[in-house]
Image: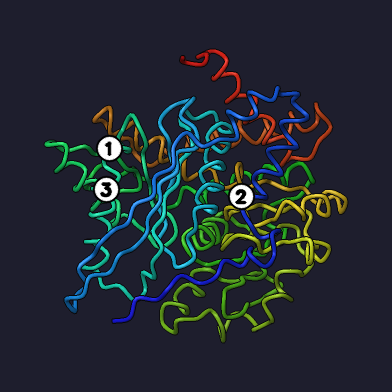
Amino acid sequence: MLVESPPVQPYLHDPELNPLLSAEARFDAAAQLLGLDDGMQKVLRSPSREVTVHIPVLLDDGRIEVFTGYRVQHSIARGPAKGGIRYAPDVSLDEVRALASWMTWKCAVTNIPFGGGKGGIICDPLILSPGELERMTRRYTSQIFEFIGPEVDVPAPDMNTNEQTMAWIMDTYSMRSGHTQTAVVTGKPIDLGGSRGRPEATGRGCMIVTEQALRRFGLDRSTASVVIQGFGNVGGMAANLMANAGFKIIALVEWDGAVHNDKGLDIKALAKHRKETGSILDFAGGENIDREEAFFMETDVLLPAAKENVITSHNASKIRAKILCEGANGPTTAAADSILRDKGIFVIPDILANAGGVTVSYFEWVQDRQGYFWNEQLVNERLQEIMIGSFNDVVAYAEKHKVDNRTAAYMLALDRVAFAIKLRGIYA
């Protein structure tokens, strides 16, 4: 087996694609509008802790490979750090820093008592066996053991990690602790303290805020058109839930192409087709079209739910959606924000739109600590209450301060975290 070297980061050639620079640009704009003093800006901007570990793993063929892993805790002012762990060849410290800061603001926007954290390992999980992935995960957990915990930092799944990964982390942490600690991670299997409704939570949250936005435009979900990019955990769940609720999804965009049907795609049939063929293309219930053609078609709602940096200063002018619901983290660069604003597009920013996942992760953490678990109806009711309340908070803040929704979300989040820091004071 060959272990590939990490690819060159794309933002080394184009700084606009650096997620940390986008996060910092939005932070600076919000902090200036809030009138935060220099000292508070330094506190809010700086990560609380950054951990880099080098992880030796015994591969199946007997060789030893060393992987690099990160865990960044951006803020613990409002509670334990919270955020996912991703496995990918292009994981970088800058990316993890940016994602950790977004988690801080996401938790603050939804008023969840967590700070922000994020982790990752530079690897290609597609060429690692299940045994190699388990050994890598357990060694990584052991090396960050003292920096995580139910009251310290609570990881969760992210790109290329799942409930099995969380089970390995929970077990490793528990073995080191000497007793079972289910609340150390969220996104676990139901049988190990996971929450009902968690797999659907991010997609469900996107659906909830999209419907709130449609109402502001006087549009009905049964007639409004929706284009979704991504058919994975977030995009696939959002598509399935929205289709079941009566939304008309006219196009779905994946890495290898797109399918389109003006009357609405049958999402269940499309999912079955993808499972059988490995692709969404050549689906009998739609026509194959170019990915860019689908992404930039005229629609009421565009929901990018795949990866970062898909909307940039180079293509933002081509967006023809009334509403942009950011299901992915960082799908829009900071340089594209003003273009979308000038076009009058109603943006539901990522730190609000995809907060359903961390909201139900919070519910899971609460249930683990209580030792009492809720039914799915209660989970979904409480998720809806928080998502609608957070949507209304952001829109009201935008209207009050005469700014766009993204700036309002950042201002609201910074305001809440800064307020908590001022109440706590600076420990000397």
Q: Residues within 10 Å of mark 2 (few under 14, many from 20)?
A: many
Numbered disc 3: secondary structure: helix
Report the residue at 42% width, 73% height from top. 5
Pick whichever of labels 2 and 1 is earlier in the sequence.
2
Whether residue 63 sits left or right of residue 410 in the image: it is left
Whether residue 37 sits left or right of residue 116 in the image: it is right
Residue bearing mark 1: 146
In the picture as drawn, the residue positioned furthest to the front comes out as 428
State the separation of the CA atoms marked 3 and 1: 8 Å
Residue 27 % position (x, y): 68, 38
Residue bearing mark 3: 143
Numbered disc 2: secondary structure: helix
Determine contact: label 2, label 1, CB under 8 Å.
Answer: no
Residue bearing mark 2: 20
Whether residue 413 sits left or right of residue 317 in the image: it is left
Amino acid type, label 2: Leu
Residue 128 % position (x, y): 30, 72
